[in-house]
Image (cartoon, rainbow, N blue to C red):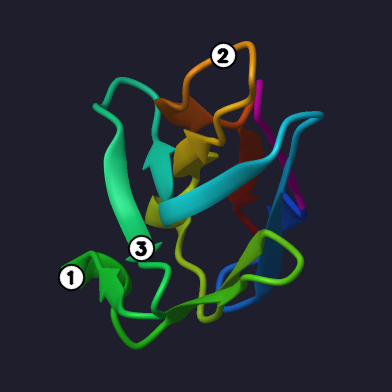
């Protein structure tokens, strides 16, 4: 199957910056459709932070517009989330998400999957 591995989380002071990386990998041939970052704070539902299509069109939650920037490298199968001017309310576990097409082989048909990373914790606190 396809795996998404996130990195770049940690503790940062209010007003600081962090950059998250999500890398997709698999032993199978695959293609990536929309990719994005979600977050889940304690006691709250998971919410979309930012997304990017395979063509580079982006979408942001109102709460992060102007502060966060999502980017994508289709040759490396990665996305980044640059987070600036971080606030305590940005504290959450951040998850990478991707729509994946696993390419057909002689022994198996193609498959469409929704894949999640394991999550990375971001804590914004002084």
Q: Farthest residue in the front direction?
A: 106
Return the residue at label 2.
Answer: 108
Q: Is residue 64 left or right of residue 84?
A: left
Q: Position of residue 13 (x, y in %)?
A: 66, 65
Q: Position of residue 5 (x, y in %)?
A: 73, 38
Position above or below: 49 against 106: below
Location of residue 72 by image quarter: bottom right
Q: Position of residue 98 (x, y in %)?
A: 46, 43
Kindly identify the residue that appears in the image at 63 percent across and 68 percent down. 80
The C terminus sits in image quarter: bottom right
Secondary structure of the residue carrying numbered label 1: helix
Return the residue at label 1.
Answer: 62
Kindly identify the residue that appears in the image at 32 percent across and 71 percent down. 64
Q: Disc 1 versus disc 2: distance between alpha carbons?
A: 41 Å
Magenta highlight on residue 6: yes
Main SS, magenta residues: strand
Secondary structure of the residue carrying numbered label 3: strand
Decide: few, some or many residues near mark 3? Use Cα within 10 Å; few <14, some 14-19, many ≥20: many
Kindly identify the residue that appears in the image at 29 percent across and 49 percent down. 48
Q: Earlier in the sequence, mark 1 or mark 3?
A: 3
Closer to us: mark 3 or mark 2? Answer: 2
Magenta highlight on residue 79: no
Decide: few, some or many residues near mark 2? Use Cα within 10 Å; few <14, some 14-19, many ≥20: few
Return the residue at label 3.
Answer: 50
Q: Is residue 110 left or right of residue 62?
A: right
Position above or below: 108 against 122: above
Residue range in magenta is: 1-7
Closer to us: mark 1 or mark 3? Answer: 3
């Amino acid at each position: 199957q396809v795996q998404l591995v996130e990195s770049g989380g940690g503790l940062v002071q209010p007003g600081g910056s962090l950059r998250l990386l999500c890398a997709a990998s698999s032993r199978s041939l695959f293609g990536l459709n929309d990719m994005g970052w979600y977050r889940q704070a304690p006691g709250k539902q998971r919410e979309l932070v930012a997304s990017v299509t395979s063509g580079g069109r982006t979408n942001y939650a109102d709460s992060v517009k102007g502060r966060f920037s999502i980017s994508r490298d289709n040759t490396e199968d990665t996305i980044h989330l640059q987070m600036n001017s971080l606030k305590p309310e940005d504290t959450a576990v951040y998850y990478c998400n991707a729509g994946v097409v696993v390419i057909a082989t002689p022994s198996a048909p193609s498959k469409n999957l929704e894949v999640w990373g394991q999550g990375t914790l971001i804590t914004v606190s002084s």
